[in-house]
Amino acid sequence: MTVHPSLQTYADAWTHSIEAISELVQPLAEGEWNRATPCPAWSVRDVVSHIIGMECEMLGDPRPIHSLPRDLYHVRSEFARYMEMQVDVRRHHTAPEMTSELEYTIIRRNRQLRNENRSPETMVRAPLGAEQTLEQAYRIRAFDVWVHEQDLRVALNAPGNLDSPGALVARDQFISALPKVVAKGAGAPPHSAVVLDVHGPVEFLRTVRVGADGRGTVDGSPSLGPAVTLALDWETYVRLAAGRVRPAAVADRIKIEGDAGLAAAILESFAVTP
């Protein structure tokens, strides 16, 4: 593979997750494609359609020309409308059509990865006509595919890969969002600190510190006398950060020490996926 070394981690994580997804859905009966997933309003078919669509965009394929129905209550923004297009256009596809398109898309993307020789700083297309670096695109695809792999595993009662390469990419992506969650979303006061203590298949301890200017930073050093300490397992962290569950539904899986009001505000702001 000629992919740049800084992209290799994301390429490997993407490959691991996309192959796991293919194995999960290959044997599904027609009716199983309609099972609801934790991803709001999306079925197994919808999640796989989204993955296929996003990978086709990475390949440079043109977006489908398709009019969305007006009664899709979960489509409330231009970003959601953009994402829904690739999903809705496949809503009536059969199981064989879904698996064959997924397999063909994986083959094409694997070929693209093998031949990748662009710099990580190369600008490529992003949703809604925006641009992003190639490295950011690789990272987001690895993150997105792993999160959706977990959606499918929950829907199909097939748990696993909570500590896979994609899980580590997701960990870093979620941690990078913590300063915004704590300082901006929850409004933690200046000169305060919040500790996140996560255990399970993926373990980490991070402290978010809010400076005098109200901006947050995150590091791996413990804090003496934090305003809040949240201790929870990795699976619960993922479900909250990905917006798959409300804090009240998993309250028994979260240990809170310190300012209860600030803790509640943090948990209410915890979801960082669009």
Image: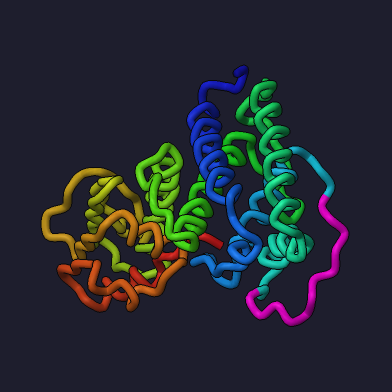
Q: Any magenta on residue 71? A: yes
The picture places residue 118, in percent across and down from the top left corner, at 68, 24
Question: Looking at this rendering, what residue extends furthest in the right direction?
Answer: 65
- Number of numbered callouts drawn: 0
Say if residue 194 shows up in the picture.
no
Q: Any magenta on residue 199? A: no
Above or below 124: residue 216 = below
Task: Locate residue 192: give its quadrant.
Answer: bottom left
Position of 52 with respect to 183 (left or right) is: right
Residue shown at 32%/49% (left/top)? 218
Position of 54 with respect to 163 (left or right) is: right
Say if residue 245 shows up in the picture.
yes
The picture places residue 130, in percent across and down from the top left corner, at 72, 50
**Foreground residue among 189 and 241:** 241
Above or below 241: residue 201 = above
Q: What span is in magenta?
A: 63-74
**Foreground residue among 242 and 33:** 33
Q: Main secondary structure of the magenta part?
A: loop
Above or below 51: residue 116 = above
Position of 140 with respect to 202 (left or right) is: right
Task: Locate residue 43: give its quadrant.
Answer: bottom right
Position of 137 with respect to 100 (left or right) is: left
